[in-house]
Amino acid sequence: MLKIRISKKLKLKIIYPNTKFKDNRGIYLESFNQKKYSNQLKSIEFVEDDFSINKKNVFKGIHGDNRTWKLISCVYGKCAAYIVDCRKNSKTFGKWERFIISGENYFQILIPPKFGNSFLVLSKIAVYHYKQSKYYRGMNNQFTYKWNDPKINLKLNKNKIILSKRDSKN
């Protein structure tokens, strides 16, 4: 049985897998099991897994699309995940929630379509995992909001973050 919590601001599902095993050799974690997740994910079928490996102060996002569910986690290191509601007709449009996710506190966040996904690496290196319900079709098929959009107003130190060309221009 999975432990589920609903986030306060955006009402996102926070999922705590219960198969973590830790000893002097390391950690074992079952990150997904269709039978165990089926009650929580109902009709979502995941088709792709992606990993992003980055160094400290890298900021990725705010990206998303109108059709893809994402189940995200940080399997190594530590990240601040910023999830933004990008549904233009929503009461919480432009609002965001921040979560500290890591290989130590391991939990997952289920991100619906039309929400922006972004993260800031807080450790020396981090491995960020995306499980997606649709195949990635390239950045031209996604929306991108600029990290310092005043309507969103993320709390980031602009002098310390490392951005891609895509994230610094949009």
Image (spheres, rainbow, N blue to C red):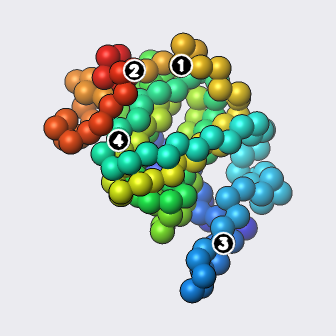
Q: State the CA–CA distance, disc 1 to disc 2.
A: 9 Å
What residue sits right under mark 3 in the picture?
A: 28
Q: Residue furthest left?
A: 159
Residue 138 in picture, x, y percent from top left: 59, 19
Q: Return the residue nearer the eye: 156 or 51.
A: 51
The first of marks 1 and 2 along the sequence is 1
**Is residue 96 visible to the viewer in this orientation of the structure?**
yes
Q: Earlier in the sequence, mark 3 or mark 4?
A: 3
Given residues 39 and 141, the one toward you in this image is: 141
Dot 1 and dot 2 residues touching (CB under 8 Å): yes
The tag on residue 139 is: 1
> Residue beneath label 2, please?
166
Q: Is residue 11 left or right of residue 71?
A: left
Could you tell me how far apart the alpha carbons at marks 3 and 4 are, in whole angstroms? 27 Å
Q: Secondary structure at mark 2?
A: helix
Question: Which circle's residue, 4 or 2, is located before the other in the chain?
Answer: 4
Residue 107 drawn at (x, y percent): 54, 60
Mark-to-mark CA distance, 1 and 3: 33 Å
Q: Is residue 11 left or right of residue 32?
A: left
Element carrying mark 1: helix
Q: Is residue 36 above or below residue 115?
A: below
Task: Determine the secondary structure under disc 3.
Answer: strand
Q: Residue 151 appears in which quarter of the rendering?
A: top left
Determine the CA span between mark 3 and mark 2. Answer: 36 Å
Q: Earlier in the sequence, mark 1 or mark 4?
A: 4
